[in-house]
Amino acid sequence: MTRLGTYLFRLFAAEAAALFGVALTILYLVQLLRIVEVGAVRDRGLGTLFWQTILGLPPLSIAFLYVCLAIGLARALRAMQASRELHIIHVSQRLPALIGTILGYAAIGTLMVLLLAHVIEPLASRENNQIKAQAAADLVGRSLVPNRFAELGDGVTITVGGRGADGEITSFFADDRRDADTRRTYIADSALITADELGYVLQLEDGTIQYRTADGQFSEISFERYDIALERLTGDEDTGERRGDQSTYGMIMRGLTEGEWPAESLRRIAERTSDGFRVLALCLFVAAISVFPSGRRKEPALPVEITVLGAVLFERAVTSYAPVAGWARETSGVIVLIVIAVAILVYRLRVFAPLPREAHSLPREALGR
């Protein structure tokens, strides 16, 4: 990288790092305040609480990192416009170096977000879910006092008839009133708390599940065995792929091994990939509107930060309402934004503009020079 490229890259990275540092600090404090109360109720240590807040940062960091990268680039170009550095770069015909540095900056940002989305975020989510599952198991275990009703959370009441020496539970009863539309009751002759590959589950044996809707309709389902995730009883999210802890590598290897590609897996892979290429799309858009100098002395009426946020909202709106289904919808907004940014760049660079009339009259040797 040339000296100019190094200077420009440091300028872009410094602006983005300052914004992301402030955003990350605020996110960490919000995460900490959000779970401290729940953690105190469940008697978890401070070390676990702090570690859980850190594990909750990767998905939030992905949502803010690409915005900070784009706004950092836009603010740096605006400062170069104000100091006339942008004019000097154009006059000295160093525009290719500027665009090349922006592309390198966008490529590194894209790789960072792809690493977060495909590797770090699933690992953090899996670890966080294991902590939640362990906390749920501890809470349920402490609440299972024979012949005594206990509240697991807002709207969940549980009681058991007895507990054996091997951990077996007899006469299990749980009433879930959290859903205003459907009240659910679990009744079983015996139960056992165990663990599987997705976390801790409560294995119910020989019982029924009773449903009562808001209009008074009643239904009952009998079972010989029914596994219920403890997180469902304690109010946390249910286990499984919906939690987002399945790694991209694991989903790809499972698809290659089984020969089947579930729609949910394809959608999640496309969503994570789009998170990375959203950096490239936004940086190209910022370059298209800010890399060319202007002779105006006043600042634009619309701040560049608002313009970037508007582009983000436009991309998300296209992704949400694109007339396609499945994994293609997750990539539609990024593709549209990249096409728009490239079209603006091509137009402003006059790539397909005809040569001046004087140039046509010059000999071919002169044009080659």
Image: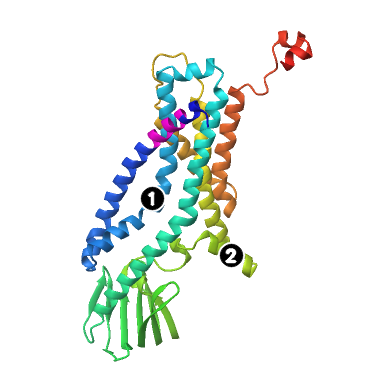
Q: Between residues 59 and 229, which one lies in front from this camera angle?
A: 59
Helix, strand or loop at mark 2: helix
> Which residue occupies 45% across, 36% down?
70
- Picture layout, residue 164 above or below residue 4: below
**Which quadrant of the figure has residue 243?**
bottom left
- Picture layout, residue 326 above or below residue 90: below
In the rendered view, does 30 fall on the left or right side of 261? left
The verdict on residue 339 being magenta is: no
x, y percent for residue 364: 78, 14
x, y percent for residue 124: 40, 59
Among the two numbered marks 2 and 1 on one chain, the one whose residue lies closer to the N terminus: 1
Name the front one of labels 2 and 1: 2
In the rendered view, does 112 fall on the left or right side of 127? right
The C terminus: image quadrant: top right
Q: Residues within 10 Å of mark 1 (few under 14, many from 20)?
A: some
The verdict on residue 13 being magenta is: yes
x, y percent for residue 71: 42, 34
Give the extent of the magenta segment: 7-16
Residue 218 visible here: no
| Kind of residue at disc 2 | Met
Provide the residue designation for mark 2: 253
Which circle marks residue 60 in the picture?
Answer: 1
CA–CA distance between discs 2 and 1? Answer: 27 Å
- Picture layout, residue 358 above or below residue 109: above
Residue 340 visible here: yes
**Which quadrant of the figure has residue 257?**
bottom right
> Which residue occupies 35% across, 56% down?
56
x, y percent for residue 76: 42, 28
> Which residue occupies 27% across, 89% down?
161
| Kind of residue at disc 1 | Leu
